[in-house]
Image (cartoon, helix red, strand yellow):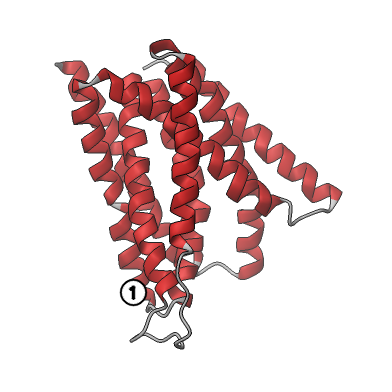
Amino acid sequence: MAEIILTWAYALISVILVSLISLIGSFALMIKGKKLSKILFFLVSFSAGALLGDAFIHLLPESLESASALTVGIAALSGIMIFFVLEKFIHWRHCHVPTSKNHPHPYAMMNIVGDVVHNFIDGLIIGGSFLVNVQVGIATTVAVILHEIPQEIGDMGVLLHGGFSKKKAIFLNFLTATTAIVGTVIALVVGARYENFLAFLLPLAAGGFIYIAGSDLIPEMHKESRPSKSLLQLAGILIGIAVMASLLFLEI
């Protein structure tokens, strides 16, 4: 019983921290453009390394301990396809009516819908990871947080460009982030009853992380071609992977 309570406590505290990351977009508005771009420049590569590290060092190895290689492979591919469809969904519609506070562009609305689904999935992943063990849960939470920071800053930009006021953009961004809590609760309840749920969820999460790193973050890094900057990006990726590897020695 005590172990179940601790699992719930760790998972809920972690997902609440992830949800609060949504507020970082509002603080980012106070930072000057050049300084913010320098922070994001390194954070994107660091995030890519953390996501790949979590997928290949924690999630996939843990998955193979409780499921066949075929099941893990299908689930990982499903994760890649789900995030591909989600991205297509976000960029589905365009509008030719000028943007205003009374007429936010549909792409901003679609961004909100996409974030709700994305954050819900993040919550499922965090909850499922803590059901495996605290080590995997913390590693996954760190990877999600590192990915969420640049994403939330980008989301704020999309909402503001789409016609929302700053206050409304901050509120909506935070509201969508709280769906991660719902996802975590569902994962804890369902995962505790059905072992097959975790056997599919973990590699699915790994596939999603691999897709985000390979499709979103790495292409963003390729926009910078200067050798010195490229070496810094490589260092960021390796540091992100090293952080995930170091969490293997965590015992709670």
Judging by the rendered image, the residue that carries numbered circle 1 is 167
228 to 62, vertically: above or below = below
Q: Quadrant of residue 210?
A: top right
Residue 249 x %, y %: 50, 15
Foreground: 63 or 95? 95
Q: Quadrant of residue 141?
A: top left
220 to 31, vertically: above or below = above
Foreground: 101 or 93? 93
Foreground: 88 or 164? 88
Looking at the image, can residue 208 be seen?
no
3 to 188, vertically: above or below = above
Residue 74 x %, y %: 46, 27
Q: Residue at x 36, y 34 (%)?
A: 125
How many marks can you see?
1
Looking at the image, can residue 172 be seen?
yes
Residue 88 x %, y %: 48, 57
Residue 152 x %, y %: 45, 57
Left of 174 or right of it: where is 92?
Answer: right
